[in-house]
Image (cartoon, rainbow, N blue to C red):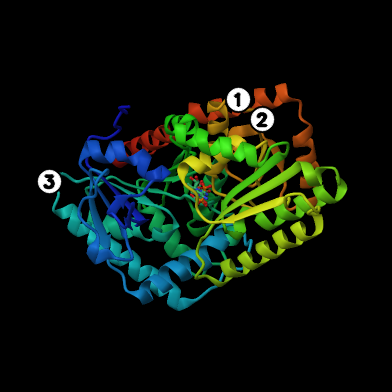
Amino acid sequence: MSHHVPTDRPLVVIANRLPVSQTDDGWQAAAGGLVTALRPVIEATGGAWIGWDDDAEAVPRRVEGLACDLHAVPLSRAQVRGYYHGFANRTIWPLFHDLVVQPVIDRSWWRAYAEVNNRFAEVIADVVRAMDTPPLLWVQDYHLMLLPEMLRRRLPDSPLGFFLHIPFPPPELVARLPWRNQLLEGLLAADAVGFHTRLYRDNFVRSVQQLYGGVASLGDTLALPDGRHVRTVANPISIDVEEFSELARDDETEEELAELREQFEGRRVFLGVDRLDYTKGIRHRLQSIQLLLERNPRLRREFAFIQIAVPSRDDVKEYRELRTEVETEVGRINGRFTEPGHDVPVHYLYRGVSRAKLAAYYRLADVMCVTPLKDGMNLVAKEFVTCQAAGDGDGALLLSEFAGALLEFGDDAIRCNPFDVEGMSYLMEAALDLDPADRRARLRRLAESVRSADVYTWVDSQLGEIERSSRRP
Ligand code: ADQ
């Protein structure tokens, strides 16, 4: 399908990682929402993608299936440790997710973060100077918050945008960071800064207003004391709806689904799909399942909860501890509620699964549990409703009030507060008792709302904002 290209400049995307992976068959384009969405624009405009890779020296300029130039930023092991495992994942991540765990403040990590952002800026400047026209520069996410300022100095002629994929916390939390001013100033050098929701955008604006006196907020534009204007926009990311709808009905998915239906015959299936991350609320979810089974002995044979947990950041202490806690909880529930001669109630898969399998699980589920303690957006919820609708399903979505996705879904999802473990267990029961016609109608509306603003809408409007705001004086 061809898509409208919202800019006539080359697009340069800058993200922590390059969208490639090394397999037995050589380098390949990685699958993922951002790559899929950006591919048409980056390919049509002859752009480039700049990011870090473990094996930076070996990354080829081009890989099959992705017609844009790749430039790897080489970093030392110590830099990666400080910038990525340290500052990004143990300081910013927990702080920006409302202190689900305590952030660690470490000056050597901060120095590595600034150094790495600077290293990115140098590589980008070299790439851009070799191009014929000044490209549109689009920086992604919390790993690179100092970069806009570093790029602005070096490349004043390029429209420059930033998008934050995680929540932006309220100013009281930002205040805990000794380097909050540098980060805010880093972001404010962009022409446009994007967030998933109004709330995150407003938190950012309030933080900026506390940093400088006399910042005027004119609609979506911030007027800074030095006369500069910065657009700050709420714009929810989404998925490629066509691609997921096709995947959901594809032969391979149907085969996987047939097997799963046989395996779980006669049982109501609850599903969780998350990176194994403490923000995702997996432990709270398991505790609710435990209460559900405690109150409803009948369910013990007629129920299955499948948790797919994708390994994530396992070189970080908090993530290793989480894994132990989750696995202990799974063992406790199965030990307590498995009945002789019957299958276990909780199926736990610690691994990534293929796209077709993922789509088959989405179609299988009666109730999808998306119950993060805090989540910027959450694409799993959008993938679930899209796959269910494509397969004419009537699955229910249990959705946390602390996921950005809730704002688009309103009352058609069953909204829950994951901190209230007992309350959530009653909502799980309610989900099982919903009238099928009601479930189907809700699912249709949920899928319609995802379809009405897919990932291409997101890219178009972000690039449009960056382009327009860069033209203002
Ligand atoms: P994540 O925290 O990674 O992203 P999410 O938006 O749910 O969270 O995206 C996860 C992606 O991984 C989904 O596309 C999903 O299909 C895929 N995935 C999950 N489990 C998988 C499995 N077992 N096998 C294969 N693939 C699997 C961050 C923010 C989010 C925000 C996104 C995008 O934390 O809030 O929505 O960025 O901005």
Give the number of the mark in front: 2 or 3: 2
Query: Quick one: 301 or 22, which is closer to the camera?
Result: 301
Residue 382, numbered circle: none
Return the x and y of residue 249 as percentages of the image width and height: 48, 29
User: Dot 1 surroundings within 10 Å: few (below 14), some, or many (20 or more)?
Assistant: some
The vertical placement of 355 against 394, above or below, is: below
What's under tag 3, amino acid-wise?
A: Asp
Residue under label 3, please give it.
132
User: Can I make out residue 230 in this image?
Assistant: no
Q: Residue furthest front?
A: 341
Could you say where residue 120 lies in the image, as x and y percent from the top left? 29, 62
Label at residue 445: 1
- Looking at the rendered structure, the kind of residue marked 1 is Arg
Q: Are there few (<14), some (14-19), or many (20+) residues within 10 Å of tag 3?
A: few
Of pointers 3 and 1, the one earlier in the residue sequence: 3
- Mark 3 or mark 1: which is in front? 1
Check contact, mark 1 vs mark 2: CB within 8 A.
Answer: yes
The amino acid beneath tag 2 is: Asp
Q: Earlier in the sequence, mark 1 or mark 2?
A: 2
> In the rendered image, which quarter contains the N terminus?
top left
Task: Tell me: residue 55, above or below residue 392.
Answer: below
Question: Which corner quadrant holds the C terminus?
Answer: top left
The residue nearer to you, when weighing 159 against 293, is: 293
Residue at x 76% of width, y 35% of height: 432
What residue lies at 81% left-to-right and 49% top-to-bottom? 293
**Residue 114 sits above or below residue 204 on the image:** below
Q: Find disc 2 in the rendering and name its residue.
A: 412
